[in-house]
Image (cartoon, grey):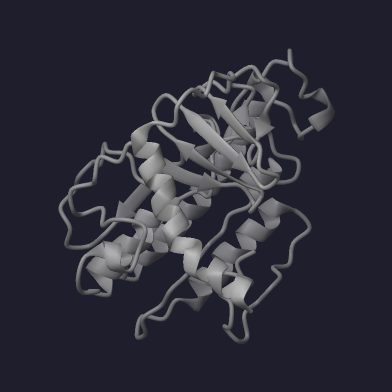
Amino acid sequence: MFRNGLFLGIDHLRRYTPGDTPWLRDVQITKDFINHLDDRKPFFGLLFYDAAHGYSLPENSTPHFQPSWTALDVLKLTPNASSVEVHNLYRSALYNIDGLIGNVLTHLKNRKLLDNTIVIITADHGQEFNDNKKNYWGHGSNFSRTQLQVPLVIHWPGKDKQQVLAKTLHYDISATLLKEFLHAQGKTDNYSSGHSLFEPIPNSEWMVATAYGECIAFISRDIIKVFYLDGTTETLNPHLDPISSGKTPPSLGALMASLTDYVKPSIDKAAVN
């Protein structure tokens, strides 16, 4: 996923981390990053921890949170199944990942690098445990808050502590780095879909999300409007109940029109060729 997108064109990129389980691979990338640190050179590191995806724990360990399953069994994830045990297994995987992140932060601090290093801790998606009682488990299957909302913690030397309560997107991370670290000039609208987190966050009524290129969703506080590639649409409330679509809200119509204008040149060019 990353090598075909974010890191496309970068030579000598390692594509595999040794380890028989997600947990062992998480341990390995932590060791590799710490060993890679060089006090004399600038560095960048992306540590993509995978144990939570696989509900993976150290071999023969007891889950930290109880009661808990000892391993994931998707056949037990039925509409009326209890979510407590599988949720605690997931929480235990995250608990162990927290320990690995703690090791990284400790090494940065001990080597006097933490005061000169930006650290961003977040996730690529949320995780659902049948929260909306629609038999959705995991992620990538709907646009509810449980599958979209993620934590975001940023350590930025020289910046005052603050808590951002406004709605933010992952786009804002790249915009913040471009504006505040790389000192990109001009308005962030000129080079990013996001906004700097150190500036007032626009009060946007709608946000846009996609799922593996199969559909696009426009999401507000009360409505989830999904457009599929086959031309069908779906209008849901935040708990995924179908609702009458009615007329398209003017604000959503304006947003959709702006996206159409954005892709129009590519479509026209393709038609000409």
Residue under the image location 69 percent in, 68 percent down: 17
Viewer-side residue, 207 vs 125: 207
Residue 255 locus on image (x, y percent): 38, 46
Give the position of the N terminus as an image quadrant: bottom right
Question: Compared to 61, does 35 lie above or below?
Answer: below
Residue extending farthest right: 75
Residue 223 locus on image (x, y percent): 46, 27
Residue under the image location 75 percent in, 53 percent down: 21
Residue under the image location 73 percent in, 27 percent down: 69
- Report whether 234 appears left or right of 112: right
Question: Compared to 68, does 62 lie above or below?
Answer: below
Residue extending farthest top: 80
Give the position of the C terminus as an image quadrant: bottom right
Residue 123 locus on image (x, y percent): 50, 48
Residue 114 visible (yes or no): no
Viewer-side residue, 257 vs 87: 257
Residue under the image location 45 percent in, 76 percent down: 37
